[in-house]
Image: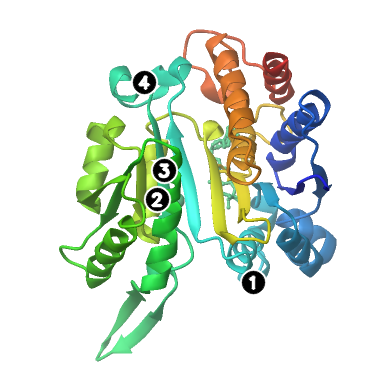
Amino acid sequence: MSNPSILILPGDGIGPEVMAQVTRIIDWYGNKRDLAFDVSTDLVGGAAYDAHGVPLHDDTMARAMQVDAVLLGAVGGPKYDDLDFSVKPERGLLRLRKEMDLFSNLRPAQCFDALADFSSLKKDIVAGLDIMIVRELTSGVYFGEPRGIFNEGNERVGINTQRYTESEIERVARSAFELAMARGKKLCSMEKANVMESGVLWREVVTRVHADYPEVELSHMYADNGAMQLVRAPKQFDVIVTDNLFGDILSDCAAMLTGSLGMLPSASLGAPMDNGRPRAMYEPVHGSAPDITGQSKANPIACILSFAMALRYSFDQGAEADRLEAAIETVLADGLRTADLLGEDGVTPVSTSGMGDAILAALD
Ligand code: NAI
Ligand code: MG
């Protein structure tokens, strides 16, 4: 059998810097754990625009459809800010998400003990936190028709439409129940069924899908209350599933419970491929960080944790994902910090590759 395949798209800014550390870790798995991957690399975002005049070449798109998983760094930067909307770096990312039909966006919010002081909340509220927000990514108000700015009488009206079909709700609900089964068997679904018909349908369909996962404890919450509860007592949750708009807001809110942008991974999953695993793309939540590009300051952990998610969700290597996360935990407990994780206690920061060195040493 051939090795599992990964397409790496480092992108722009710090993307290639953090991805270089991931590549070292992928090599470590091949050498030390007999877990080799067929890795290929290609361009996305500004880097692709510079080479081809488009933020994602058709050949790259075709390759993304053929591999077991895509790992993406980050796209964009000031150099591309004035480009026409149709060729902006972000369009490369959007095309990947759309053509791969990645409807289920997983955003973990996990608090490493060593970083609990970093949260804006009290330490005991976030210490040990490990929750997962599942955001529907390909429908809802960001895509619904009609949309636009129209003339109405003697003024203009801005319109967006929250629209969900039953099958769109069902597939993301299923993905969330599957995750809950593999985790703490607790799922909370968030909508605004009190004021939105799309929320009523959402609640109905999630409840129906629940019948296939009777072991999972399902609860429903209005999304505004959900926002309050996330800040008040986040550890009450295990998996949360919600729509595109609420998920955008709630996942950013949950992310900040745990500290730096440099620590946050994500996965975007689609329908199962021939190998039974979902079509998938993994990427850090952060952008290309032009303010620190080229200074060896970038924290590679968000990107490395994204690879850990790939091990878990695309390659059936949950134990190896645990191993990698434990190595990161060890390094943080030892006090290693990239510049973004520094408080005021005068610790000297390590470089991007210094953090990579330490994680590899901890893996050994
Ligand atoms: P950003 O995430 O790139 O940076 C925000 C702040 O966090 C900066 O001060 C940056 O230095 C810091 N930061 C981010 N990642 C870090 C890391 N790994 N280690 C240490 N510090 C880190 O967001 P910003 O500045 O709003 O956007 C910069 C560019 O990135 C823009 O062109 C934007 O369009 C693009 N972007 C791309 C995304 C993607 O590729 N998924 C997501 C967000 C923004
Ligand atoms: Mg957002």
Q: Which residue is label 1 attached to?
A: 86
When asked about the image quadrant of residue 131, the answer is: top left
On screen, residue 255 versus residue 124, left or right, reads: right
Residue 338 visible? The answer is no
Depth check, mark 1 against mark 2: the one in front is: 2
**Residue 177 bears which disc, if any?**
2
Depth check, mark 3 against mark 4: the one in front is: 3
Query: Which comes before the other along the chain, label 3 or label 1?
Result: 1
**Residue 127 bears which disc, if any?**
4
Q: Which residue is label 3 attached to?
A: 181
Q: Are marks 2 and 3 in contact (CB under 8 Å)?
A: yes
Work out whether residue 172 or residue 87 is closer to the camera in this orientation and state it: 172
How crowded pointer 4 is (Cα within 10 Å; few <14, some 14-19, many 20+) is rated as many
**Identity of the amino acid at label 4?**
Ala
Query: Which comes before the other along the chain, label 1 or label 2?
Result: 1
Depth check, mark 3 against mark 1: the one in front is: 3
Cα separation between marks 2 and 4:
25 Å
**Identity of the amino acid at label 3?**
Met
Cα separation between marks 3 and 1:
41 Å
Up/down of 141 relative to 300, above or below = below
**Identity of the amino acid at label 2?**
Phe
When asked about the image quadrant of residue 140, the answer is: bottom left
